[in-house]
């Protein structure tokens, strides 16, 4: 593999130096410590060679050459410091400073223009300046001051080549050449998604974070990882003081992590002030005596009609912990022996691996039940069920970045442009490079513009479409016979099951022409590398497991797995949903997917943990809610989850939560769930703690604390241990020398991590010290001195016989069918700016300013039928509940389909959804609910 | 007890915010989409045809409305900015945005462009520009335009698409009043006429194998023919280089004749288009070209109609089998698109921004393919060279130079026009022998040997041979051989300073804006030379960075007029 690299020897300023193949003169000079001025060149971007600050003299050439665009040839004689070269560099800088120097100095402390101008002592004041233009301060996240612009186009390349958002451009020409958003529109009115990549790229301050935060004093920088989605972008927090003088994150820059290579999205870059939001819980709260629990309290509090203080009183930590643990212990100890456990716990995929591990250990050993689950049940449980059954592992086979090596990308039921923006950028890069994208989604999401085929099939007919594809592959001889023979079981059964699924028949069901189904099937099967990525559009169905089985079958019968640029990638939603599941925060498995029903596994954990353990799988999220409603679950500990917003059929779920005898909620905000709690424990935000998280690529990464929690809030890990100690477990992770649990401490987190690593084979080669050193390691990693495996299943699947198993699926209509009474269907989902239930992002000023109120996307034809104007108020009703919101008329949704984000309590989408669940993954069908919509005559819609 | 309460709004009032979360940016409504589809007609929705699509919209609606651009972007599955930045780059597109009420202002009922090129300015264009607006009324828009390529007819005004030669305010008013807005079709030799004169026999011989490729390449090399667009690269060598590149190879023909003072390509095209087309097809045969793109400047409306007609005739009755497809492309008003790589960008439907080289267009050109790019006139001579033999061409010339040159002569001479004269002829000989001398009472003062970028020489240097390579020692070059003559008489004084100011305004307007030395350099130089006193050391530094560090020839040559003034006309600066 490692051939000796042929270095290119050339001469720079009379000194012999070498360049790597492909390395520019500019970069080689920098390595040789003879830096050349440069402005438009940036490591992450394709060179443009337009600023001309880096020109050098090359022997034999008539004019000077831009060193950022030229690679040296052997023996080339280059002068970067000759009188001629320096004169040109200086005059270029003088020209730019005469136009932009003063404004650049006013906008940033880190002007690269002024740095180089000062360094070369470029003269000032000799040249006339250009006319000043008005700044664009329309956007809450960043300001545009084109007076400081030098037209270097780094922002454009960041926006278009890198993020492929295609908003920024260079319009007009000559001295009028101008950086524009869309059609020279104000930023806020443009299609800008505020990823901030342009701000990060700007060398002169022409693009800067809004309200001058870029000029503020930064006291420290902390390297960590983004807490929002599963992509796992590494970032740097720049910590200073906010308006109140409190230590806070002022702005964020992307780091060169394996998953993001410096890129971030609007949430990761501009969504961190929630950490210092005034609503942070800072004192333990105990429900006032005699104040009952009523689901109606949630909206009363949210609307400001009922102060929290009417429901709760403040308490000290000792009292609160005693009350919290005492209530749980009392219910546990009062239960009838042998009866199902009356306790359950919800952990969170927003917490760290260490918290997840400790939480499930608490429930299993302390609550003495496997009733522990988290939001994975609401996102990828069906995917994981199908993957475990089919290929023996719930994790992805290939990382997202493998799209760079794929020839065809099948993106189904996922809207990464909103939900995994940086992953979307890799897909868009791949398309620009020449890969073909198949987008299968009833909605025309932003990815549709890049798709070779957009299969806008009828909602809820995934299985029909996918079995149609399988039929073509099976009947047209597109099966990879050798792969199937060597590595796959159950082919004949699958073949039989899709025999009837002709493209013509499936076309009638799913609405995609038979010819297109054939074309896509052939393209997928025959490409050199086809990779499938999917999201909640596959999994959040009552037949979500069947959907995923079909995708697995596609990859297996065509042999499109086990190589780079192929495989199966369920895009994980939460930043740590992979890690939390790995760590055992699910009712049927211990850490590393070891089944609780297996005796030898139970025996192993009993001896490791020193406690007796149950032998039956616990209940899942929705089952726990049903059990609570039925009165069989009576006490719960909820850490960092918000089931009163995220669960389906919310009215029912909230009633169930209100019915609990004892509810302990540990969180950073008074969530909808916390409003119904008996004890509320103020916890730590991600930016306030040590911990590891595992991204969608199986990449485990370390997070470091930048801030200390407000008031008396404590570290989550400490709180979990305190509860454990109070219900009879003799834990000793957080020791006296680690502090009182308020400020972050590394040692106790490392202790938990190392215990966890002991039961998790994939982490064998990743001790805590390695994580601290390397920041990120892809798993599984057997050895400490080797990188982990990014692509897995290359020669065998982790099953008993090493082979994968095909599981047939047949199309069957779901329970939520449109009818005369409920003629429309609604899909729930997310918007770019808001994370899940909005607990964090709706408290981030910039994000809330960008997406402040709930909208229902509706097709123009449906809108016309309802006599709805864009922006008009409407009421949406289902069999389960009703909400009111504002119409956003767009052809991006199909006729007959509505889309609504679930982040808004004002129009909580899950009031509409039903709680019917998938038989295998136990996931609710969030993506399809039959509804009807009516116009609200008066304009008094919420949020308008 | 201090307990947190949850307010309704978390966002502070002063923060800019959206009214609601919604799909951002302009929305395209179905009727606008239909309007755009209608304007495009049968044009295929190819990205490289974007400029043709913008022409179709601009022609139909008299302007490019923001809502139409958004709809066009949607049809192309492009981002709005990708369409907007192209539309806003070219002079001939009138990009308009909606007012506060969302409505668009109606376009002017008629646009009159007055050429402000140097020859037209010498002939009184300035007075015309000042006089016309009041004469034509408020609903007619009067614009200044860079050289329209009709310098022998100066001053020139263009009523919509109809050029008015030797324009007076009254004649322009007459054309405008009668709404005579279309250019006349030139009375050129058509296909039957050309065939009757033995046309396309050469091409048939080539395709029939009567002539072999090697002999044709050799003849081209022996003739010494050099690229007549201005750069002067030996044509035969270029054929050989591109031929050696991997297939498919493409060809791009440059008829974006935009160098002020130049009109030779139009002159020949208006008279004998097939002589050019045959040369082009012979080149395509010799080099092995898969497809040809002909890029014609938008100002040549009559020529466009002519070429469309003659290309259709050629397609209907091809003189040989297996000819490559020929696509005619329309420029949109951008001098820079005469630069070879900028033209390629424009043919690809993008802004005309020159590319950095290496790689050269012969290796990586149009659509990333090896590309043979030629000026119109270079191809125009191919038939004569091959039929008469390379010696015919090489034996022409004067003062030790070889070949023929087509001089576009304008300014103060009795008989301006295209003069086919021996290479190496001096200015004085050219004027006296070919142009009927200077007007009565005029004394030669100065001349521009090569259009706007070729520099300015004083009368004392009117005896230098005019050819490639002969003028470099004097800080000038012949370029496209556009000669403009300045004189003095009892009634007038032409000044080199005024010429330099005219030319620098032109360069500032026509700079593409990509690189600092040209974008900022031309703007600063223009501002500095408009002052009464010139800061000579500063101008010298500025000139040097423009020459040394600009990406393309525009910026590299833009300081020539200024440097020439300093070098040859210092007396004007003393008095200025």
Image (cartoon, coloured by chain):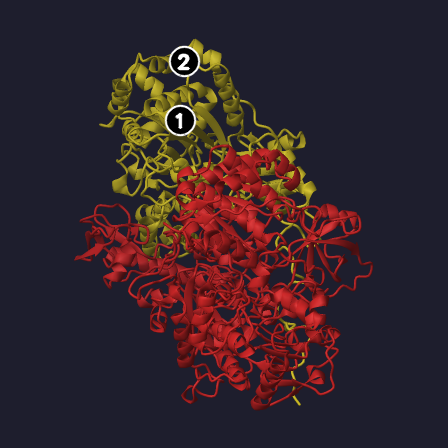
Chain colours: A red, B yellow
Say which quarter of the image contains residue A295.
bottom right
How far across and how far down the image is residue A138, in percent?
59, 63
- Element marked by disc 1: strand
Which residue in the structure is indicated by mark 1?
B290
The residue under the point 31% across, 46% down is: B568
How many other residues sit within 10 Å of disc 1, few (<14), some (14-19) or many (≥20)?
some
Parent chain of label 1: B
Is residue A175 visible in the rendered structure shown here? Answer: no
Say which quarter of the image contains residue A514.
top right
State the mark number for residue A172.
none
The residue under the point 47% across, 48% down is: A805
Above or below, B193 against A665 in this view is: above
State the mark number for residue B199.
2
Q: Nearer the viewer, residue B342 or B190?
A: B342
Image quadrant occupied by the C terminus of chain A: bottom right
How far across and how far down the image is residue B479, in percent?
34, 35
Nearer the N terminus, badge 1 or badge 2? 2
Is residue A671 visible in the rendered structure shown here? Answer: yes
Number of disc labels:
2
How far across and how far down the image is residue A871, in percent?
72, 57
Outermost right residue: A937
């Amino acid at each position: 593999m490692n051939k000796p690299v042929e270095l290119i020897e050339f001469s720079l300023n009379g000194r012999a130096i070498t360049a790597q193949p492909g390395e520019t003169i500019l970069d080689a000079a920098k390595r040789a410590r003879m830096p050349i001025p440069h402005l438009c060149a940036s490591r992450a971007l394709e060179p443009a060679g337009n600023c001309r600050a880096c020109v050098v003299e090359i022997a034999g050439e008539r004019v000077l050459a831009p060193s950022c665009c030229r690679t040296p040839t052997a023996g080339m004689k280059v002068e970067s410091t000759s009188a001629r070269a320096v004169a040109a560099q200086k005059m270029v800088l003088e020209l730019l400073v005469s136009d932009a120097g003063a404004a650049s100095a006013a906008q940033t402390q880190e002007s690269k223009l002024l740095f180089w101008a000062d360094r070369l002592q470029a003269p000032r004041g000799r040249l006339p300046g250009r006319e000043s233009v008005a700044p664009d301060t329309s956007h809450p996240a960043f300001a545009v001051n084109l007076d400081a612009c030098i037209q270097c186009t780094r922002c454009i390349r960041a926006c278009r080549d890198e993020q492929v958002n295609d908003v920024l451009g260079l319009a007009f020409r000559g001295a009028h050449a101008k950086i524009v958003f869309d059609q020279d529109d104000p930023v806020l009115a443009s299609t800008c998604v505020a990823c901030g990549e342009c701000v990060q790229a700007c060398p002169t301050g022409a693009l800067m974070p809004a309200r001058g935060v870029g000029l503020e004093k930064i006291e420290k920088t902390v390297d960590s990882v983004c807490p929002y989605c599963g992509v796992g972008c590494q970032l740097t927090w720049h910590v200073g003081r906010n308006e109140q003088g409190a230590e806070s994150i002022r702005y964020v820059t992307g780091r060169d992590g394996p998953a993001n290579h410096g890129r971030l999205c609007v949430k990761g870059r501009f969504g961190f002030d929630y950490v210092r939001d005034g609503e942070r819980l800072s004192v333990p709260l105990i429900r006032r005596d005699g104040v009952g629990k009523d689901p109606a309290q949630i909206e009363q509090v949210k609307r400001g009609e009922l102060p929290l203080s009417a429901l709760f009183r403040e308490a000290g930590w000792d009292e609160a912990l005693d009350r919290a643990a005492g209530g749980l212990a009392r219910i546990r100890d009062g239960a009838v022996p042998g009866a199902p456990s009356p306790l359950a716990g919800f952990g969170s995929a927003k917490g760290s691996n260490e918290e997840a591990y400790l939480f499930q250990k608490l429930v299993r050993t302390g609550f003495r039940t496997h009733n522990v689950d988290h939001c994975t049940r609401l996102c990828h449980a069906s995917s994981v069920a199908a993957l475990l059954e089919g290929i023996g592992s719930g994790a992805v086979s290939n990382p997202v970045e493998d799209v760079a090596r794929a020839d065809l990308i099948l993106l189904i039921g996922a809207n990464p442009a909103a939900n995994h923006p940086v992953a979307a950028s890799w897909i868009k890069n791949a398309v620009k490079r020449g890969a073909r994208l198949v987008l299968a989604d009833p909605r025309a999401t932003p990815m549709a513009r890049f798709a070779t085929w957009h299969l806008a099939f009828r909602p809820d007919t995934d299985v029909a479409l996918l079995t149609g594809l399988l039929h073509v592959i099976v009947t047209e001889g597109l099966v990879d016979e050798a792969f199937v023979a060597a590595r796959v079981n159950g082919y004949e059964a699958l073949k039989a099951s899709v025999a009837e699924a002709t493209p013509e028949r499936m076309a009638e069901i799913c609405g995609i022409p038979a010819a297109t189904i054939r074309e896509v099937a052939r393209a997928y099967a025959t490409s050199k590398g086809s990779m499938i990525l999917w999201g909640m559009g596959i999994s959040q169905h009552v037949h979500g497991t069947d959907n995923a089985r079909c995708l697995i079958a596609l990859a297996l019968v065509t042999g499109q797995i086990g190589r780079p640029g192929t495989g199966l990638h369920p895009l994980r939603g939460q930043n740590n949903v992979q890690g939390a599941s790995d760590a055992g925060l699910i009712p049927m498995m211990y850490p590393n997917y070891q089944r609780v029903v297996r005796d030898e596994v139970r025996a192993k954990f009993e001896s490791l943990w020193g406690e007796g353990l149950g032998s039956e799988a616990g209940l899942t999220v929705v089952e726990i809610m049903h059990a609570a409603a039925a009165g069989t679950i009576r006490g719960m500990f909820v850490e960092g989850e918000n089931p009163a917003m995220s669960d389906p059929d919310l009215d029912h779920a909230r009633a169930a939560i209100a019915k609990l005898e004892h509810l302990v909620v540990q969180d950073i905000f008074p969530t909808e769930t916390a409003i119904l709690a008996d004890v509320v424990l103020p916890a730590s935000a991600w930016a306030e703690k040590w911990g590891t998280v595992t991204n969608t690529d199986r990449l485990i990464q370390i997070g470091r604390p930048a801030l200390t929690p407000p008031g008396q809030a404590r570290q989550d890990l400490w709180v979990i241990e305190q509860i454990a100690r109070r219900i009879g477990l003799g834990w000793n992770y957080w020791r006296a020398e680690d502090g009182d649990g308020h400020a972050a401490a590394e040692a106790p987190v490392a202790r938990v991590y190392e215990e966890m690593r002991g039961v998790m084979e994939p982490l064998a080669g990743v001790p805590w010290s390695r994580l601290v050193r390397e920041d990120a390691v892809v798993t599984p990693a057997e050895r400490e001195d080797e990188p982990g495996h990014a692509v897995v299943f290359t020669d065998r699947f982790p099953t008993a016989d090493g082979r994968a198993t095909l599981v047939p699926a047949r199309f069957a209509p779901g329970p939520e069918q449109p009818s005369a009474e409920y003629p429309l269907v609604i899909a729930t989902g997310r918007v770019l700016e808001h994370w899940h239930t909005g607990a964090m992002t709706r408290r981030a000023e910039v994000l809330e300013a960008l997406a402040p109120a709930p909208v229902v996307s509706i097709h123009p034809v449906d809108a016309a039928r309802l006599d709805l104007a864009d922006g008009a108020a409407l009421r949406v009703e289902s069999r389960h509940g009703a909400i009111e919101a504002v119409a956003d008329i767009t052809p991006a949704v199909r006729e007959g389909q509505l889309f609504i984000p679930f982040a808004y309590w004002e129009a909580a989408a899950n009031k509409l959804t039903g709680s019917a669940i998938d038989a295998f993954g136990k996931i609710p069908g969030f993506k399809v609910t039959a509804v009807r919509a009516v116009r609200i005559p008066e304009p008094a819609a919420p949020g308008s | 007890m201090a307990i947190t309460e949850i307010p309704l709004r978390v966002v502070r009032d002063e923060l800019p915010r959206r009214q609601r979360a919604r799909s951002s940016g302009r929305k395209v409504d179905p009727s606008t989409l239909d309007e755009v589809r209608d304007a495009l007609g049968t044009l295929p929705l190819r990205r490289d045809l974007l400029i043709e699509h913008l022409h179709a919209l601009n022609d139909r609606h008299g302007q490019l409305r923001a809502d139409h651009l958004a709809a066009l972007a949607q049809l192309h599955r492009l981002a709005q900015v990708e369409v907007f930045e192209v539309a806003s780059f070219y002079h001939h597109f009138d990009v308009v945005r909606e007012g506060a009420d969302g409505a668009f202002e109606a376009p002017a009922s008629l646009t009159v462009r007055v050429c402000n090129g140097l020859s037209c300015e010498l002939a009184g264009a300035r007075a015309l520009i000042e006089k016309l607006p009041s004469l034509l009324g408020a609903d007619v828009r009067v614009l200044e335009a860079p050289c329209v390529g009709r310098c022998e007819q100066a001053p020139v005004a263009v009523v919509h698409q109809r050029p008015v030669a030797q324009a007076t305010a009254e004649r322009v008013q007459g054309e405008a009043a009668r709404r005579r807005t279309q250019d006349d079709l030139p009375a050129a030799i058509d296909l039957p006429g050309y065939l009757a004169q033995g046309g396309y026999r050469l091409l048939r011989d080539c395709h029939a194998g009567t002539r072999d490729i090697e002999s044709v390449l050799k003849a081209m090399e022996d003739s010494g023919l050099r690229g007549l667009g201005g750069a002067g690269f030996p044509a035969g060598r270029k054929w050989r280089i591109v031929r050696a590149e991997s297939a498919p190879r493409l060809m791009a023909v440059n008829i974006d004749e935009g160098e002020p003072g130049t009109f030779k390509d139009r002159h020949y095209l208006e008279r004998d288009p097939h002589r050019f087309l045959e040369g082009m097809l012979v080149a395509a045969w010799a080099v092995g070209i898969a497809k040809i793109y002909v890029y014609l400047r938008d100002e040549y409306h009559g020529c466009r109609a002519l070429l469309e007609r003659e290309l259709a005739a050629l397609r209907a009755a091809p003189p040989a089998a297996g000819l490559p497809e020929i696509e005619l492309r329309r420029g949109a008003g951008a001098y820079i698109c005469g630069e070879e790589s900028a033209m390629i960008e424009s043919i690809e439907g993008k802004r005309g921004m020159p590319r950095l080289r290496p790689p050269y267009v012969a290796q990586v050109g149009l659509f990333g393919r090896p590309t043979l790019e030629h000026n119109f006139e270079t191809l125009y001579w191919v038939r004569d060279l091959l039929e008469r033999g390379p010696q015919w061409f090489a034996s022409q010339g004067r003062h030790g130079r070889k070949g023929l040159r087509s001089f576009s002569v304008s300014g103060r001479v009795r008989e301006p026009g295209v003069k086919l004269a021996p290479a190496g002829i001096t200015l004085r000989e050219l004027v006296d022998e070919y142009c009927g001398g200077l007007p009565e009472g005029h004394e030669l003062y100065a001349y521009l040997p090569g259009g706007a970028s070729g520099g300015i020489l004083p009368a004392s240097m009117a005896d230098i041979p005019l050819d490639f390579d002969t003028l470099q020692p004097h800080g000038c070059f012949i370029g496209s051989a556009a000669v403009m003559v300045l004189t003095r008489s009892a009634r007038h004084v032409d000044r080199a300073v005024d010429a330099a100011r005219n030319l620098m305004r032109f360069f500032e307007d026509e700079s593409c804006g990509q690189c600092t030395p040209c974008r900022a350099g031309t703007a600063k130089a223009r501002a500095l030379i408009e002052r009464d006193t010139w800061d000579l050391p500063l101008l010298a530094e500025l000139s040097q960075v423009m020459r040394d560090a600009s990406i393309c020839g525009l910026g590299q040559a833009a300081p020539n007029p200024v440097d020439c003034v300093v070098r040859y006309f210092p007396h004007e600066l003393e008095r200025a």
